[in-house]
């Protein structure tokens, strides 16, 4: 029997996070688990995230609103928690998109304590990312908004309910930031302020930001959701232990500011711990976390990715410094028809990206793609727990062989995250994914034959091709993980219980 929701038996509070660099398909799993839950809550990230959910044959791209919103008419509550960074324009747009499809959001609640992304924070992100200092961010203002929170001049969603407080807090924040803007060429600042994500210059006045324009625009956006702002921490605590709660992660553990490949990370803590804190809980309140693990991991932006197919050439290809990366159709035109088994790694990486449609939901950028990495998985299991869901082997039935990384070599020595300390001249510990070391690591692979075929219409784990089952079990065993579910397609039915 393929009763996938049986993995939730006996649980009350569950979280879904990504073990790697995000884009692993949390949205599908949250959507699948949503009928089980009474409350679906987000606690991390902002509109840098992107989930695509297929509902009644339509694809919905959500950036801020939890994927449980499609159960709103069933009376389920969806929460944007205190740990989320809210761009009010994005939220208003997302609500309009739902309305235009006849979808309701009566039970959506937005935390009064959620961070408010401001135009100067978006501008700073754009300015940094177009300089040599960028990490390849999504340019949504995420780094600056979390910086401003910690630096004590950020604003919260609650300010939108109090125009006077909003004006005085905004004034203070803008004054503090003025010094930062003074460090950039005024022409570039002006150009940046005319970016479409900054409402094409509406906020620009006399070389800096027009506070009145910001207030007017933000209060206008807020009209759509002011009635949804609430003390969500209180709502969550009241529900705890009585209702079934599903926490929806954003990004992935290796992009966590605390546990990821720092500094090539996002600015919130994407781990279950960060997710719990982002809804006003602590980690101990989560009964179980499920980590999604994408069969072929991907990464967007810069930063270490040891099993990347095509290595640094692929990293540069996907993140050109001086131009925009190619879009999906442009790449197709550039490469033409390429086999998934092409001996040239850069071409092979393109072929696999194309098969997996691995282009950013938020930015359209091509994602770097790599082989399964059980070193990173072991690390993730240590932090997030052993229950994993392997996602999306289905596009890769053409592969003759699959390389599974079981360890890394560093300067001729085995490098093992969470096991042995590295022996070398640098005084570095290898208990976390250290960027300096990872950049020098060479993965060692075990090669397994592919399964050569389609996974269409398979409805039970036992019916998967034997070669694929061997690979999946190998990944789970090497990762110290319990494989609970396998997803072999975007539809809910294409999820197999591992029994
Ligand atoms: P930021 O979150 O926009 O500051 O970007 C920081 C890093 O996180 C960059 O490498 C982004 O590509 C990456 N990132 C942020 N959000 C996502 C996501 O939803 N999926 C994958 N990568 C992301
Ligand atoms: Mg995504």
Image (spheres, rainbow, N blue to C red):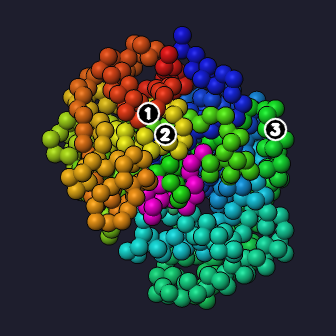
Determine which residue is flagged by label 2. Answer: 381
Given residues 50 and 328, the one toward you in this image is 50
Mark 1–mark 2 contact, CB under 8 Å? yes
The reply, left or right, for residue 259 in relation to residue 323 is: right
* Residue 148 position in % (x across, y down): 64, 72
Secondary structure at badge 2 equals helix
**Quick one: label 1 or label 3, which is nearer the N terminus?**
3
Given residues 36 and 306, the one toward you in this image is 306
Residue 24 in the magenta stretch? The answer is no
**Residue at x 82% of width, y 53% of height:** 231
Q: Nearer the viewer, mark 2 or mark 3?
A: 2
Whether ligand 1 has any atom under 8 Å from the Cβ at mark 2 is answered as no
* Residue 443 position in % (x across, y down): 26, 46
Q: Residues within 10 Å of mark 1 (few under 14, many from 20)?
A: many
**Quick one: label 1 or label 2, which is nearer the N terminus?**
2
**Residue at x 35% of width, y 28% of height:** 474
Q: CA distance from mark 1 to mark 3?
A: 33 Å
Q: Is residue 108 above or below residue 221?
A: above
Given residues 453 and 408, the one toward you in this image is 408
The prevailing secondary structure element of the residues shown in magenta is loop
The reply, left or right, for residue 246 in relation to residue 473 is: right
Q: Is residue 97 above or below residue 261?
A: above
Whether ligand 1 has any atom under 8 Å from the Cβ at mark 1 is answered as no
- Residue 457, label in figure: none
Determine which residue is flagged by label 3. Answer: 239
Magenta part of the chain: 260-272
């Amino acid at each position: 029997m393929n009763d996938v929701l049986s993995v939730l038996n006996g649980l009350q509070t569950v979280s879904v996070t990504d073990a790697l660099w995000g884009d692993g398909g949390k949205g599908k799993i949250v959507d699948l688990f949503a009928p089980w839950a009474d409350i679906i809550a987000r606690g991390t990230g902002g509109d840098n995230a992107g989930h695509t959910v297929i509902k009644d044959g339509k694809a919905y791209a959500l950036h801020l609103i939890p994927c449980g919103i499609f159960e709103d008419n069933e009376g389920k509550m969806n929460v944007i928690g205190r740990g989320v960074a809210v761009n009010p324009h994005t939220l208003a747009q997302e609500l309009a998109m739902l309305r235009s499809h006849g979808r309701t959001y009566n039970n959506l609640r937005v935390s009064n304590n959620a961070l408010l992304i401001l135009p100067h924070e978006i501008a700073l992100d754009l300015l940094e990312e177009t300089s040599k200092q960028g990490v390849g961010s999504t340019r949504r203002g995420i780094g600056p908004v979390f910086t401003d929170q910690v630096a004590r001049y950020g604003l919260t969603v609650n300010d939108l309910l109090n125009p006077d407080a909003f004006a005085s807090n905004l004034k203070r924040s803008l004054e503090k930031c003025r010094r930062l803007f003074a460090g950039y060429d005024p022409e570039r600042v002006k150009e940046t302020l005319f970016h479409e994500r900054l409402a094409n210059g509406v906020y620009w006045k006399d070389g800096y930001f027009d506070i009145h324009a910001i207030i007017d625009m933000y209060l206008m956006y807020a009209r759509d959701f002011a009635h949804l702002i609430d003390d969500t921490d209180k709502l969550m605590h009241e529900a705890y232990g009585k209702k079934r709660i599903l926490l929806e992660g954003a990004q992935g553990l290796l992009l966590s500011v605390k546990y990821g490949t720092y500094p090539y990370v996002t600015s919130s803590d994407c781990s279950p711990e960060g997710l719990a804190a982002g809804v006003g809980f602590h980690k101990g309140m989560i009964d179980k976390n499920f980590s999604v693990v994408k069969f072929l991991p991907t990464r967007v932006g810069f930063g270490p990715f040891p099993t990347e197919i095509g290595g640094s050439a692929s990293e540069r290809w996907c993140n050109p410094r001086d131009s925009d990366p190619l879009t999906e159709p442009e790449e197709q035109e550039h490469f033409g028809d390429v086999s998934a088994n092409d001996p040239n790694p850069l071409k092979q990486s393109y072929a696999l990206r194309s098969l997996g449609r691995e282009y950013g939901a938020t930015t359209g950028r091509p994602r770097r793609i790599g082989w399964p990495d059980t070193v990173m998985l072991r690390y993730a299991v240590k932090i997030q727990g052993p229950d994993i869901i392997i996602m999306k082997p289905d596009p890769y039935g053409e592969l003759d062989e699959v390389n599974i990384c079981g360890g890394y070599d560093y300067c001729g020595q085995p490098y093992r995250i969470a096991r042995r300390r590295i022996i070398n001249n640098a005084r570095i510990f290898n208990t976390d994914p250290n960027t300096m070391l990872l950049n020098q690591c060479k993965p060692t692979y075990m090669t397994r034959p592919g399964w050569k075929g389609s996974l269409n219409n398979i409805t039970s784990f036992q019916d998967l091709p034997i070669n694929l089952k061997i690979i999946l079990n190998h990944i789970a065993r090497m990762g110290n993980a319990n494989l609970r579910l396998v997803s072999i397609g975007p539809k809910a039915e294409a999820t197999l219980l591992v029994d």
